[in-house]
Image (spheres, helix red, strand yellow):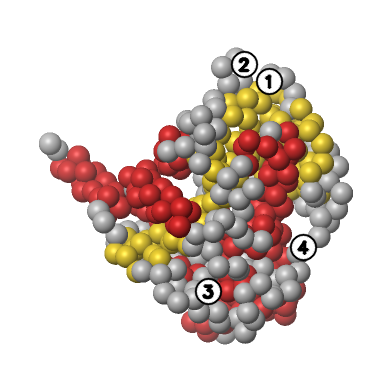
Amino acid sequence: MSCSWLSIFALVAFCVFPSCSPPRVDPARARAVSSGNPPGTFATLWPRRLPPGTPSYHVKQGAPPVDEGTFKSCRIFKAGAVKDGVALFVASRRQFPIEESEEPFTLTVADAGKDRVLEIQTADHRVTLAVARRAKSDRPRGLVIYLASIMLISDEEKAFIRQLQKRGWNVIAITPSIDLFAKDRWDQEWDLSQLNQYASLMAYEIDNHLVETAYATEAVLAYLHQKNPSWVRGPHVVIGASAGALAAPVLIKRLEGVDAAVYVGGGANVPEIALESSIRIYRPKILMSEKGSPTRHRASRENAIQRLKELALQRSQIDPLKIAPTLPPVPTLMLSGELDRIVPAHTGDLLYNALGRPERWRYPAGHIALFLGLPLQANRVIDWIEAVVARTPGIARN
């Protein structure tokens, strides 16, 4: 075996093997609510949505999507059949249009016949993708709402979902809104005098992204309840992965509770995550005055970023740090990477405390390693879900 192969093997071992081994388990503790409000009393200010209308799309290949109509504050389109289910896209109208990207989002739905290929534009609409997959069982145990990462359902997440199906769960996979954090803002330049405006803009974008997942999910649930209620029978479980874990508390609040919740690689204080993530989610360009040394400019910039985090968090209405302490009692499990730099590990601790210190499995791994090992953890997680659902009264059961 060559040196290069040994290096690759060592890297894979470092990334994956920690997620294969038993995690460090923090057992659930008594719920600690630190928001100053008893659970359920926080007056949530939900971002508005206009009547949904029809988004712009272009059919490049295959049959056009079927317009299923308006559900809640969203318009639902059936994009086509997939193995074991159906692919949908969900659109709600923006209050303030954004500049359209040069390359529209391309959605490809692969089925047994000819693939369907659509180009979807997001200038006037927020668009979320959803895939509903049936359980490999004649009598499904219930429904898992899987809030996916920004990878738009990675191979590891697909393997995890297949295991949920195999164990008898219907699954609805919901992706983050496809225009996450309005990338047209990234190249804007601003100076220190504009700090307040940019904090408000950042809080606005974060809240609209988080709530879009909740609005799209409740629309899909309403659609399935009307069109095929067998999909949504039984206990409901929310699993949030990475970006999906950021939106999970907002969804649970919107649904007024579920039977169980699992957070994989999640965190709280989204301004902190967006500005400190190693994948550079959001990096505003701060212009400094010409006077002063580079060291002084660097210190000024660091102070400005810290102040931006503080102001954006204050102005966000539905950051997980604010929503999580107000949730109804829900059996909760967290899977955390102790070396996570994508959703920084300390923000995972913030979520853990905001949720009232639920059961937590901690792995000596980073964010990517946590997800590479996710298929190997699937049966452990499903065992936990089925155990807590079996012993707790149903919140979301029909």
**Between discs 1 and 2, the one toward the N terminus:** 1
Q: Give percent across and percent down for residue 280.
A: 52, 60
Q: Using the numbered discs, state the Cα–Cα distance from disc 4 to disc 1 in whole angstroms.
A: 35 Å
Mark closest to the chain's N terminus, 4 or 2: 4
The location of residue 8, given as percent across then percent down, is 24, 44
Q: Could you say which disc has been placed on residue 47 in the image? A: 4
Q: Which residue is mark 3?
A: 354
7 is higher (above) or lower (below) than 168: below
Give the spatial CA distance, label 1 vs label 3. 47 Å
Front disc: 1 or 2: 2
> Can you tell which of label 2 and label 3 is closer to the viewer?
3
Give the residue at mark 1.
61
Question: Dot 3 lies on which element?
Answer: helix
Which residue in the structure is indicated by mark 2?
Answer: 114
Mark 4 or 3: the one toward you? 3
Determine the residue located farthest toward the top in the rendered image. 113
When asked about the image quadrant of residue 2, the answer is: top left
Identify the mark at residue 83; answer none if there is no mark: none
As shown in the figure, which amino acid type bears the numbered disc 4? Pro
Give neighbour class at mark 1: few <14, some 14-19, many 20+ (Cα, 10 Å): few
